[in-house]
Each structure stands twice: as C-alpha cells, then as structure tokens.
Image (cartoon, helix red, strand yellow):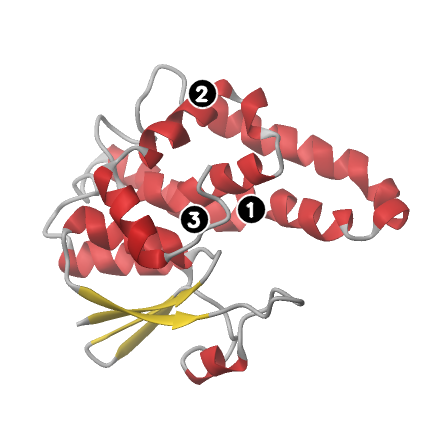
Amino acid sequence: MIVVHHLNDSRSQRILWLLEELGLPYEIKRYQRNAETRLAPPELKAVNPLGKSPVVTDNGRTIIESGAIVDYIIRRHGGGRLQPPPDSAAYDEYVQWLHYSEGSAMLPLMLNLYVSRLGEAGAPLRPRIESELANHLGYINNSLKGKQFLVGNSLTGADIQMSFVAEVAGAFGIRAAYPEMDAWIKRLHERPAYKKALEKGGAYAYAN
C-alpha cells in the first residue's frame, strides 16, 4: 500500500491528485505546518531526514522529491498510463518537464517568496527576480499555445508535476498575465480526480 506523508499546503497535494487519476489505493499520513513559522513538524524527519514533503512509502521503499515520486508511481503502478511510450520523442519531452518544474521553474517563485519577506532590503533583487519570473512563466505559457496539455493530447504526469508552478504563480497574483497557463491550470482544477484529491487532502492555499 502506498502511503503519502502529506503536509498541508504543500507539493504533496499533487501526489494525491496523481493517485486519484490512476485510481490507486493509498493511505494518507497527515502532518500540519507550524502556524507561525509555516515549517513542517519535526515528526516528518522520522520519514525524510530533510523534514520535507512530499514523501511516499511503498513496499519498504521511501521515495522523496516530487518528480521522482511522480515517475516512481507512474512507472511502477501506472500500467502505461499518464506517460508517453518510453521509446517515443514525447517521452523525452515528458521527462524534461518532470525535471524542469523543480529544477528551474520553481526557483524564481521561491526567491520571490523569500525576498518579499525582506521588505525594502530585498529591493535590489527585485528586477532580477521579476526578469526570471517573466522568462520562465513566459516559456510555460508559450509551450501551451494551441494545446490542452503539456505533452500529447491527454493528461500526463508532466501536467501534474507542473501544476504547482502555476498554482504558486496564481497565489502571487501574476498568473493572469499568462493566459495560456492560466486557462490550462483552471482546466486541470476541474478534473474530478483533482477535486477528489482536494477533498481528501484538506484545505489547500493554492486551489485557485
């Protein structure tokens, strides 16, 4: 049985969504952020020494990192669903999105979050952060032109993995400037499996 170690308002929400899309049985072990610091509780370190979520445990394995978890679940439990054929060019594009999400796209969004907490002290960094936000969000937006999904003609793990990028951009109030991305995430949020995962995962600050 797959166990999702689920932290509220975190990237683990998309793992619940993935499991719902695949119709797989799973259990949720819940962890609550500290209301003041917004950090994960120390109990999470018993599963992941980094104290980060998402984490899944399955048949004695512990898998961390969103992209690795998406790949693991689809590869071992997906039965060929939610990914292109491994010998196709589309598969290479799919893997690229899995890595791009956290490897590149989330960096300027996280910098924006942390620097905003510095107030005027962070002002010298704002132009570079805004430039990088425009660069990456523009890239995603352009990649979605004329398409319903990031890869191929149906939902894949790439869409699920990349969803958090669009959700955080929405939380910052900057997603509307990228209409293709905005329309894409709104379509994804209408999927029954997404809504079911949201019900199971609980309150989620990025469900917009």
Dot 1 amino acid type: Met
The correct choice, above or below, for 188 with respect to 200 in the image is above
| Mark in front: 3 vs 1 | 1
Q: Quick check: 108 left or right of 72?
A: right
Depth check, front residue: 73 or 208? 208
The correct choice, above or below, for 179 with respect to 160 in the image is above
Question: In this orientation, does residue 70 appear?
Answer: no
The earlier-in-sequence mark between 3 and 1 is 3
Percent coordinates x, y for residue 32 in the rendering: 48, 69
Badge 1, how many Cα within 10 Å: few under 14, some, many 20+? many
Confirm or deny contact between disc 3 and disc 2 (CB under 8 A).
no
The earlier-in-sequence mark between 1 and 2 is 1
Q: Residue beneath label 2, please? A: 180
Badge 3, how many Cα within 10 Å: few under 14, some, many 20+? some
Q: Residue beneath label 1, please? A: 106
Element class at badge 1: helix
Element class at badge 2: helix
Task: Count the numbered circles shown.
Answer: 3
Residue at image x 54%, y 71%?
A: 40
Query: From this viewpoint, which residue is outermost toward the top?
Result: 146
What is the quadrant of residue 135 in the picture? top right
Depth check, front residue: 5 or 55? 5
